[in-house]
């Protein structure tokens, strides 16, 4: 059955005092989808085979690799996208990237460090000075075009409050990017970063995730105060192999650059993984038919028994 639509539960940012749990069907129809039919339970719905989604916003187009924040703590310090990735994009050999691929990003960290404000600044260009705790989780989809290829990030905003942590942690699984947020004016929140990472890694494969350590509320700290905490943060980032960033959701400083960097590095990793997958498939590896054998069944039986030994 062709899959051209997925149903995703959306748990709203049950913000404020009243928790709300909304399960909304959310269609994700990719441009140039495989089929013009979507099957939703017993219902077959005809949808246009071409883009139902609007084109990617002009300010979400990435043509160059965005640079790191600090050379000492960067996932990598290259100036440009990997050359294999660039060629694959030019030749439209990016496999599932650009069609179904959505990279999951989870944003974790202590309560009130500014996770929700960070996501809202980027996705909605909004800032709320009043604190409303996130209850459970919320997510936003952000669509980009990287090197001419569509690519989406699913940004999961999780609750920092202890009492909601167990709900939030059930959404950690399957992350490609883990963003650990702390407040640059609150040393304790940096101290808790390791614990947040440990919890997030319990649900994910550490070798397959990109880590970011992000200090928020830079606008509230003096240069002297900031440089002190920055040293500790960079040290920690180096230790846990995370890329370090500092920003402000109030002023917007570095917010766009940060998300562009996440999208670009996730995209690059995904295309490289696709190339590796397609490169490891050689014609001879697929099926070997033994032309000397008249009894195919006997051959396959023998193979099976070998494999179980
Ligand atoms: N000055 C300043 N205040 C900020 C910034 N980011 C967030 N805040 C404020 O910090 C408070 C907490 O922000 P949230 O984004 O709701 O915090 P959170 O990490 O999502 O908190 P939980 O949902 O409880 O985990 C709010 O009052 C925000 O207005 C920033 O960059 N600068
Ligand atoms: Mg929040």
Image: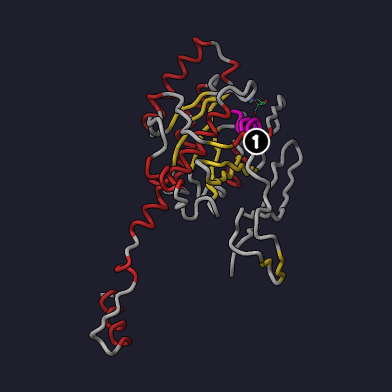
Q: Nearer the viewer, residue 272 or 134?
A: 272
Quarter that holds the C terminus: bottom left
Magenta stretch: helix, strand or loop mostly: helix
Q: Is residue 21 above or below residue 307?
A: above
Q: Is residue 2 above or below residue 144?
A: below
Tell me: is circle 1 under 8 Å from ligand 1.
no
Quarter that holds the N terminus: bottom right
Residue beneath the point at 38% across and 31% down: 78
Q: Which residues are magenta?
A: 113-123
Q: Nearer the viewer, residue 208 or 143?
A: 143
Quick one: which residue is furthest to the right in this view?
A: 18
In the displayed structure image, the side of residue 162 where residue 243 appears, left or right = left
**What residue would you read off at disc 1?**
123
Neighbour class for label 1 at 10 Å: few (<14), some, many (≥20)? some
> Does residue 121 belong to the magenta stretch?
yes
Rendered location of residue 292, percent (x, y): 23, 85
Rendered location of residue 223, percent (x, y): 51, 11
Rendered location of residue 234, percent (x, y): 41, 24
Rendered location of residue 202, percent (x, y): 45, 47
């Amino acid at each position: 059955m062709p899959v051209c639509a997925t149903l995703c539960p959306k748990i709203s940012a049950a913000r404020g005092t009243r928790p709300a749990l909304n399960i909304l069907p959310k269609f994700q129809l990719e441009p140039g989808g495989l089929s013009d039919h979507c099957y939703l339970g017993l219902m077959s719905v005809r949808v246009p085979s071409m883009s139902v989604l609007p084109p990617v916003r002009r300010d979400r187009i990435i043509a160059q690799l965005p640079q790191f924040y600090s050379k000492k703590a960067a996932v990598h310090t290259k100036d440009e996208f990997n050359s294999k990735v660039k060629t694959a994009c030019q030749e439209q050999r990016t496999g599932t990237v650009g069609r179904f691929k959505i990279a999951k990003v989870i944003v974790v960290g202590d309560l009130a460090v500014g996770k929700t404000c960070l996501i809202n600044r980027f996705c909605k260009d909004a800032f709320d000075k009043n604190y409303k705790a996130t209850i459970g989780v919320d997510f936003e989809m952000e669509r980009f075009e990287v090197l001419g290829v569509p690519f989406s990030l699913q940004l999961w905003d999780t609750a920092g409050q202890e009492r909601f942590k167990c709900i939030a942690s059930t959404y950690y699984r399957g992350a490609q990017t883990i963003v650990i947020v702390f407040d640059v004016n609150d040393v304790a929140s940096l101290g808790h970063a390791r614990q947040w990472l440990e919890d997030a890694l319990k649900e994910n494969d550490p070798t397959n995730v990109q880590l970011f350590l992000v200090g928020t509320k830079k606008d509230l700290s003096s240069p002297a105060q900031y440089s002190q905490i920055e040293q500790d943060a960079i040290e920690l980032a180096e230790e846990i192999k995370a890329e370090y960033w500092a920003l402000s959701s109030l002023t917007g400083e570095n917010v766009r650059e940060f998300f562009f960097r996440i999208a670009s590095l996730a995209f690059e990793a995904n295309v490289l993984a696709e190339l590796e997958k397609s490169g490891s498939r050689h014609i001879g590896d697929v099926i070997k038919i033994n032309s000397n054998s008249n009894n195919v069944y006997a051959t396959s039986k023998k193979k099976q028994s070998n494999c179980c030994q």
